[in-house]
Amino acid sequence: MIPSGFEYHSPSTLDEAISLLAEHEDAKIIAGGHSLLPMMKLRFAEPAHLVDINGISELKGVREDGATIRIGAMTTENELIASAILHNKCPLISEAARLIADPQVRNRGTVGGDIVHGDPGNDHPAIMMAADATLVVRGPDGERALPASGFFLGTYWTQLEEGELLTEVQVPAFGAHTGHGFNKLKRKTGDYATAASVVVLTLDGDRCSEIRIALTNVAPMAIRAEQAEDSLRGQVISDALIEQAAQQVMAVCEPVEDLRGDAEYKTHMAGEMTRRSIRDALARARG
Amino acid sequence: MAKTHIGFTLNGQPVETLVDARELLVHVIREQLGQTGTHIGCETSHCGACTVDLNGQSVKSCTVLAVQANGAEVLTVEGLAVNGELHPVQQAFMEEHGLQCGFCTPGMIVRAYRFLQENPDPSDEDIRLGLSGNLCRCTGYQNIIKAVKSAASKLQTT
């Protein structure tokens, strides 16, 4: 299978990439290409111009900037896994990346591509919502910083406007009493989640002072489970409260039936992944 | 659409060719450069049969454009044996029966070669995770794990 014809551009700077997007109406960015190229082979996407941003070095790497971790959009999954900064300051991201795709794909697949592609099966959208990330996008009119929560509007539909590209993900470093849980049910390595749940919570003594719960592949896009968060915020988290939160998570799921299971099964699994993620996050926050 | 001139190093030899931007690396390696050891399996980046080494990293060459390899170092299964002598990874796959039909083998071996440089002394679990991007429908994987373990000790003693 070969994609249909396109003109290939490989800018070496961000400004050049933005000009190319402005110049060509039917242009698409290629990052790792592991979602886009398969879609192009199947003619689900037939861009006339492909702008390859792999040669833009300013989009790569993980840096620490005070209490913020700045991740270049073109940082690969394997680079996230190898990052000592993430391992120490936001272990959720490096640990979760291990459960994305497979070793070869992780050498090409990027955090930015995974975020802006907008497939509800991609993992980084929920991870970034739970991590309270800010997404920095740039276009011909300059830069915008958007919270990850609210960025995802539907399937293949985000707040990214025509002509814009994601340049950086900014994540607050975890504090001493913050913990995370990432539980992803999948049929095999490389598969999208049947359901996945990401939890980041902070403890103040025994009480949960802050919590974010986000879900993958159980709605048209990654979603936050705000009602469940509200049930746990400010509380000493007990088994009964975990169960209540799991029920509230299941109430907001609207998965599509496919080969991974029917809607009822996927909803049930989203509840179970959430129970596990809350327990994991609690254990880590207690240290 | 005009063809693009690209050049890269394939198994230590400089190669040059003209490609369409839409051509995938695996097609150029097989059809233009005549190195058919790299196989095309699923074509959707799941099976790993097309695995090659690109600038020292394992990639699935069915999901990399040939133009993206311009200037790169590419290694395929043909580049492993030296002067007709099998590479220790190839030798180990033969001795441990790490293949039956052989279709996945070039990808398995090229991935195992790179994996053992990333992790020269792996546990069984490490091997399973390290080769999790390569599917085999014959062996049930047990002999592949044995072959990679055996290759690891061969490489450590050479």
Image (cartoon, coloured by chain):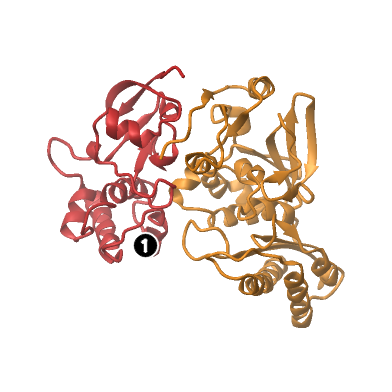
Chain colours: A orange, B red
- From this view, report whether residue A14 is shown above or below residue A190: above
Q: Report whether B102 appears left or right of A118.
A: left
Kindly tell me whether residue B107 is visible in this rendering: yes
Residue situated furthest left in the rendering: B84
Q: Badge 1 local density, few (<14 within 10 Å), some, or many (20+)?
A: few
Percent position (x, y) of residue B15?
30, 22
**Kind of residue sitting beneath label 1:** Ser
Percent position (x, y) of residue A129?
74, 53
Q: How many numbered circles does the render carry?
A: 1
- From this view, report whether residue B93 is shown above or below residue A201: above
Instruction: State which quarter of the image contains the C terminus of chain A.
Output: bottom right
Q: Which residue is mark 1?
A: B123
Q: Report whether B8 appears left or right of A49.
A: left
Chain bearing mark 1? B
Q: Report whether A143 appears left or right of A49.
A: right
Percent position (x, y) of residue A102?
46, 53
Residue occupying the point 47% across, 46% down: A105
- From this view, report whether residue A50 is shown above or below residue A177: above
Q: Quadrant of residue B99?
A: bottom left
The foreground one among A89 and A4 is A4
**SS for callout 1:** loop
Instruction: State which quarter of the image contains the N terminus of chain A.
Output: top left
Percent position (x, y) of residue A59?
62, 32
Kindly tell me whether residue A182 is visible in this rendering: no
Residue occupying the point 78% across, 72% down: A248
Residue situated furthest right in the rendering: A234
The foreground one among B51 and A264 is A264
Residue occupying the point 38% across, 61% down: B128
Q: Quadrant of residue A116?
A: top right
Residue occupying the point 67% across, 21% down: A15
